[in-house]
Image (spheres, rainbow, N blue to C red):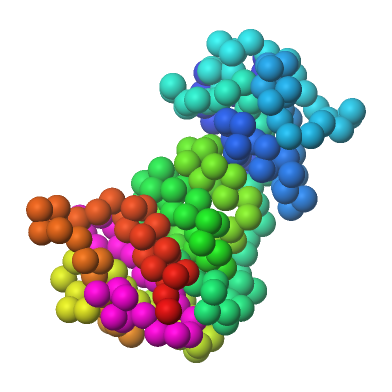
């Protein structure tokens, strides 16, 4: 086996994905340029559908695959190397549909959290997630595994200036709601009938001041006082459910 043995890193300009859901979703994504699949025969058999006869596959043992990914990564017999997805632009994803909120993440850097938020965004019909390029994880196998296939279906917009992006989102007709435990209103009280941009900050630090200033409202989730806060991915899931089920 060649190409990054033991490093857990992909070739230059490529992303290495692992696990059945992440790999299967990437294989089904027509916007992905696939380079190579390392797999066990059991791993390929677990996929939904058959690979093209000319697809580049290198058969391997589980121990060999473990050397191609991050330590203790649950590869499930599948490791796919592919090109990163093409850049997505904000103006191309804002459809103004109240049923499709946009999720804005301010310095949420943990790839597991971003992946989990992508999964919730897919589950509740969000039109995109938006992050600042310098303060978000890169596209990676960890993000894809946590997203369980959602990385391939939810547009991920990376911007240079998050405050400017929030201005563009407002101009597109979205009501920007920042989530903060100190918000005076609950999320249910702050939700409008129209399109919503949900803004979440990093755990502990929360939203930066300038980002908060670019929100139309700051709201809280009505959690018990016995708990200081929720994990940002859990908060995102609850908030997206609230948006999807508002009256």
Which residue is found at the position 47% from the left and 55% from the top?
120
Magenta stretch in the rendered image: 186-208
- Percent of width and height locating residue 43: 67, 22
Q: Is residue 200 magenta?
A: yes
Q: Is residue 68 above or below residue 47?
A: above
In front here: 18 or 125?
Answer: 125
Which residue is found at the position 41% from the left and 43% from the top?
112
Which residue is found at the position 57% from the left and 30% from the top?
19
- Percent of width and height locating residue 41: 72, 16
- Percent of width and height locating residue 222: 21, 66
Q: Is residue 99 above or below residue 58?
A: below
Locate the N terminus by quadrant: top right
In front here: 206 or 6?
Answer: 206
Locate the C terminus by quadrant: bottom left
Residue extending furthest toward the right? 53
Q: Is residue 76 above or below residue 119?
A: above
Total tally of numbered discs in the picture: 0
Residue extending furthest toward the front? 247
- Percent of width and height locating residue 229: 19, 56
Q: Is residue 166 visible?
A: no
Quadrant position of residue 188: bottom left
In front here: 145 or 189?
Answer: 189
Q: Is residue 204 visible?
A: yes
Q: Is residue 1 magenta?
A: no
In front here: 218 or 82?
Answer: 218
């Amino acid at each position: 086996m060649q190409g990054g043995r033991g490093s857990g890193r992909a070739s230059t300009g490529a992303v290495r994905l692992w696990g059945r859901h992440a790999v299967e979703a990437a294989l089904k994504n027509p916007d992905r340029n696939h380079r190579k699949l390392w797999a066990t025969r059991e791993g390929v058999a677990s996929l939904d559908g058959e690979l093209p006869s000319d697809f580049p596959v290198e058969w391997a043992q589980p121990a060999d695959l473990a050397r191609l990914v991050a330590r203790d990564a649950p590869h499930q017999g599948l490791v796919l190397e592919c090109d990163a997805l093409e850049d997505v632009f904000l103006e191309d994803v804002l459809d103004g549909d109240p049923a499709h909120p946009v999720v804005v993440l301010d310095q949420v850097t943990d790839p597991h959290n971003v992946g989990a938020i992508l999964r919730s965004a897919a589950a509740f019909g969000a039109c995109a997630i938006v992050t600042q390029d310098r303060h978000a994880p890169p596209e990676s196998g960890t993000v894809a595994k946590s997203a369980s296939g959602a990385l391939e279906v939810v547009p991920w917009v990376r911007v240079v200036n998050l405050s400017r992006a929030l201005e563009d989102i407002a101009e597109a007709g979205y009501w920007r709601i920042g989530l903060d435990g100190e918000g005076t209103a609950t999320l249910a009280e702050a939700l409008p009938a129209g399109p919503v941009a949900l803004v979440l900050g990093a755990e502990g630090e929360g939203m930066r001041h300038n980002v908060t200033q670019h929100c139309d409202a700051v709201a809280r989730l009505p959690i018990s006082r016995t708990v200081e806060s929720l994990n940002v991915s859990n908060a995102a899931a609850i908030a997206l459910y609230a948006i999807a089920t508002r009256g």
